[in-house]
Image: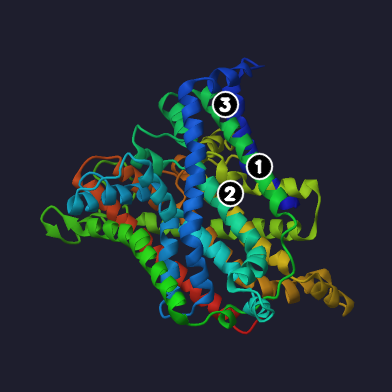
Amino acid sequence: MAVPVAFFALFFAWPVASIVERGLRVDGVWQFGRFGETLSRPEILDVLWFTLWQALASTGLTLLIALPGAYVFARFDFRGKGLLRAVVTVPFVMPTVMVGTAFLALVGRGGLLDELWGVRLDTTVWAILIAHVFFNYAVVVRTVGGLWAQLDPRQEEAARVLGASRWKAWRTVTLPALAPSVAAAALMVFLFTASSFAVVQILGGSTYSTLETEIYRQTVVRFDLTTAAVLTTVQFVAVGVVLAVHARTVRRRETALRMVAPEEAARRPRGIGQWALFAGVLLSVALLIVLPLGVLVERSFATSHGYGLDYYRALQTPDPSGTFLVPLLDTIGNSLRYAVVATLIALVIGGLAAAALTRRAGRLVRGFDALLMLPLGVSAVTVGFGFLITLDEPPFDLRASWILVPLAQALVGVPFVVRTMLPVLRAVDERLREAAAVLGASPWRAWREVDLPLVRRALLIAAGFAFAVSLGEFGATVFIARPDSPTLPVAVARLLGRPGELNYGQAMALSTILMVVCAVSLLLLERLRTDRTSGEF
């Protein structure tokens, strides 16, 4: 636990605490009375209420739509499965500002639905909820489906032989085994949607505002650090309560499970019911994910004089305005380098944390478990500003260093590594470790020979998640990325903030490139994962 605790203390707790202190401590005196003053304002109460109920609605809708997809990816074997898994993961790595823009082009004024049927959903809560499902679909499919694919289907079949119905066998055998992964996925979706920023700002307009958008407005627009500090503290406490409840409800649910290779559990759909489920999942993926992505690709080629590559060619030329010190095409290499380093950091920190949580128990460890999830629910604006304020003096003067960006990205990647690996680690039968110890294996060799083969697939999935999150991280990176090495999401956001057809087209072109890079990376990961895990269970 020592290394993860030190990492979070230095790069998360310290920056956030510094921002809160600057906002609430004036001339050495703490202004705690500002809590009651701020939280009694009607507009702040409206923001808090909308933040809560839209996050709950988004989480429920995402689970309802994505759980059938998790089953299909876990239990069915079909042509193009790896490609389709990569496709559903692409939205998760897109900058949230592009998620909002994609749905605005789809359901807003002059969008596809408006042109075809005269239907507009922008400035409605439905556009926000659907965009959140689009963004978080992969969280459920990969987190729940990763464990589901390794559960031995013969356990459920044995219950059917003993007289249980299909529903009862699934409810009493499979569902309890999946409960930790479902809870982990629901928690991550809730935290992401509760802290939603760009999606709400673009699709909700001035009608809707979340806690995250309000913190940004108070910090950047009004420069009211006191109000921002109050809201950040409220957000921090609320996330802590949610994590505590989550830890208490799922603490004792992880049990020893019989694990198999994913290839052993997957088979082609059988019967009308399974084929109907398979077709329904494909249709939902086509409408919910492929269609918005297709709109983005189409806009990247659509110029004022027809379809062409003008916007892509413009990415190779220097920016005439001087906003970007390098050609926009260089942002691709920057993003990939940052993402690789951030993934390595997240795997080391998250792997150590997951191992500690597997072997230890008690309140201290449960608190440590909750700490690891806090970056998903705390404002990225606060973390980004905190980095600039705290990491500017020796021995931690990192403001001019390139490592600052991967460190910020790794903060968001660590929770995915932990939540992906933890259910599988806890499901490893302790008797296997004990048998290895009896045969003379050291703790390190026992872990290498027993745990690692069983969790290698989960480790690769975690690496994919961490890499994807790093590619698309925007909230903190926008404040700390250097002008001579911006990332893809930062470049896209700045282009969208500038008027003109060329800027919008270049933003669409960069977003399309980001989607392709992500899809190729995930396809390579799928191939690596399949090659490494075959025959290991």
Q: Secondary structure at mark 2?
A: helix
Residue 222 shows which numbered tag? Answer: none
| Mark closest to the chain's N terminus, 2 or 3 | 3
Could you tell me if the residues under marks 3 and 1 are in contact, i.e. CB atoms within 8 Å?
Answer: no
From the viewer's perspective, tell me whether residue 361 is left or right of residue 87.
Answer: right
Q: Is residue 315 left or right of residue 535?
A: left
In this image, 122 relative to 151: left or right? left
Query: Residue visible at 46% across and 39% down?
Result: 479
Q: Nearer the viewer, residue 531 or 282?
A: 282
Secondary structure under the numbered disc 3 in the rendered image: helix
Residue 55 drawn at (x, y percent)? 50, 43
Task: Estimate the x, y position of residue 517 in percent, counting from the top left.
Answer: 39, 64
Q: How many marks?
A: 3
Mark 3 crowd level (few <14, some 14–19, many ≥20, 10 Å Cα): many
Q: Which mark is residue 10?
A: 1
* 63 w.r.t. 256: above or below: above
Badge 2 is on which residue? 411
* Residue kind at label 2, given as amino acid type: Leu
Q: What residue is shown with label 3?
A: 230
- Of the residues under marks 3 and 1, which one precedes in the sequence? 1
SS class, disc 1? helix
Q: Which one is closest to the eye, mark 2 or mark 3?
A: 3
* Front residue of this view, candidates 416 and 137: 137
Residue for point 79% across, 60% down:
359
Instruction: Answer with the quarter of the image where residue 185 lies.
Output: bottom right
Mark 3 residue type: Val
